[in-house]
Image (spheres, rainbow, N blue to C red):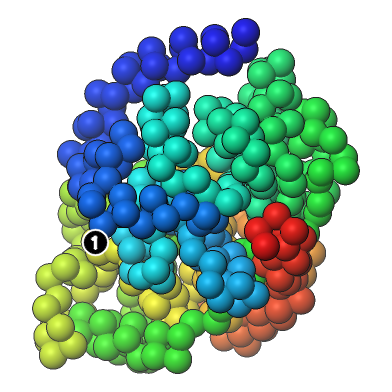
Amino acid sequence: MIWFVYNLLFPIGFMLFLPYFLLRMRRRGGYARNFGQRLGRYSPEIHAKLAEGGRIWLHAVSVGEVFVALQFMEGLRAKHPDVRFILSTTTSTGYALAEKKRNPLDVLIYFPVDFIPVMRRVLDLARPRAVLLVECEFWPNFIRMAHQRNIPVALINGRISARSFKGYHRLRFFARPLLRCLDILCAQSTADAQRLIDLGVSPEKVKVLGSAKYDILPPEADAERHARQLLEAAGIGASDRVLLGGSTWSGEEAVLLDLFKEVRTQFPDLVLVLAPRHVERTPAVLEEIGQRGLQVLRRSQLSGASTAARRPDVLLVDTTGELKNLYTCATAIFVGKSLTQKGGQNIIEPAICGKAVVVGPHMENFPAITEEFREASAFVQVKDASELKTVLLRLLEDRPAREAMGQRATELIRKKAGAVKATVELLEPMVS
């Protein structure tokens, strides 16, 4: 009965959401490319690879999850060199990242819409040997139909925020039979594990293995060199202080711009680098900068390392794929979606660079990591814009404090690494 209700309501919800989705496609770009894959329609090359069958299918919703999926693929391939993968993602940004990083022997697709005919077509074609869901991405028809075909299904690097748990708990009459279709659930923390158990998962299926985000590799050897070349092309010297707002969301750029205007009298060598989470917000961010009379240079205006430019007040990163390198040259870093928005974002990526990291009060999506960083004094969490200013002033002024915080962060990351290896070993009977 519950599956009937889902398959009755989901198409209605999909059609209601479709106009918004199409509008986002137009604004963000990239979504229209390979759109047929969402309906289970593939190019002859991809169709032929899928038809080989026997691949391990990993699903990762967006950029952060794709990074994690790639780590697991590397770990599994180290033990099984002949294994082949299907990697699916939902967003164009996740797709673009996977396209750059994946092994050419693997298949990259957009995740198909969770309609029974579409899922039946894709699963009949691909016949995966196992399905691995990254973090918290449950599509009922996909999971149930894989389970009905005796395809093992596992949750890896699983997390369920308090907010998500409330939603699942309200729908526990539906969540319980869905989650019981999974064979193994690897949780990041004991809190995540308990929430899964409270939703009806057998405790024997749930394992706490830590967060795979800690298994992040340090920046590549030439990452800082590439970032430094970019900054020099923008007129920003090696001795200049760089305040970097990473993956900022609406409202956070305004806070950082106002803060920058206030503190630059104390730090004449200070430059603000803004990297909005969504590049399509560039016009809105440019408007915020213009309203404050600040000089701005867009990353897309730089044609190469030889480009000369007078140092701007603000460097706006309106491109993708460069933030990780830029972290290596930052003096202090604010990680977005934590001050004016809720949820938070991954703080391990900037922290592995040995930098001082500051976040706002909203880190609901990463409670375990946030608490571990707090206990290690490996970052600073502020309650509002006023405290953010106070903390950044101190960090910009106190180099030993910045370096000590960065060192504590890298030590914590090294200590907590190992979830990928532990998960790969646990999944051995499933994937071998």
Location of residue 132 in the rendering, given as x and y in whole percent from the top left corner: 60, 50
Choose top left, top right, bottom left or bottom right for residue 388: bottom right
Location of residue 225 in the rendering, given as x and y in whole percent from the top left corner: 35, 91
**Residue at the image position 53 percent from the left and 72 percent from the top:** 82
Q: In this view, does 279 lie to the left or right of 138?
A: left
User: In the image shown, does 271 or 104 lie closer to the viewer?
Assistant: 104
**Residue at the image position 29 percent from the left and 24 percent from the top:** 18
User: In the image shown, does 101 or 249 lie closer to the viewer?
Assistant: 101
Q: Quadrant of the C terminus?
A: bottom right
Choose top left, top right, bottom left or bottom right for residue 144: top right
Choose top left, top right, bottom left or bottom right for residue 100: bottom left
Q: Mark 1 points at which residue?
A: 318
**Residue furthest front in the image:** 52
Location of residue 8 in the rendering, given as x and y in whole percent from the top left corner: 46, 10
Location of residue 88 in the rendering, given as x and y in whole percent from the top left corner: 43, 50
Q: What element carries label 1?
A: loop
**Residue at the image position 28 percent from the left and 82 percent from the top:** 231
**Residue at the image position 61 percent from the left and 68 percent from the top:** 76
Please tell me how crowded label 1 is: few (under 14), some (14-19), or many (20+) other residues with Cα within 10 Å.
many
Q: In this view, does 306 lie above or below 87?
A: below
Q: In this view, does 205 lie above or below 274?
A: above
Identify which amino acid the numbered label 1 is placed on. Answer: Asp
User: In the image shown, does 339 or 321 lie closer to the viewer?
Assistant: 321
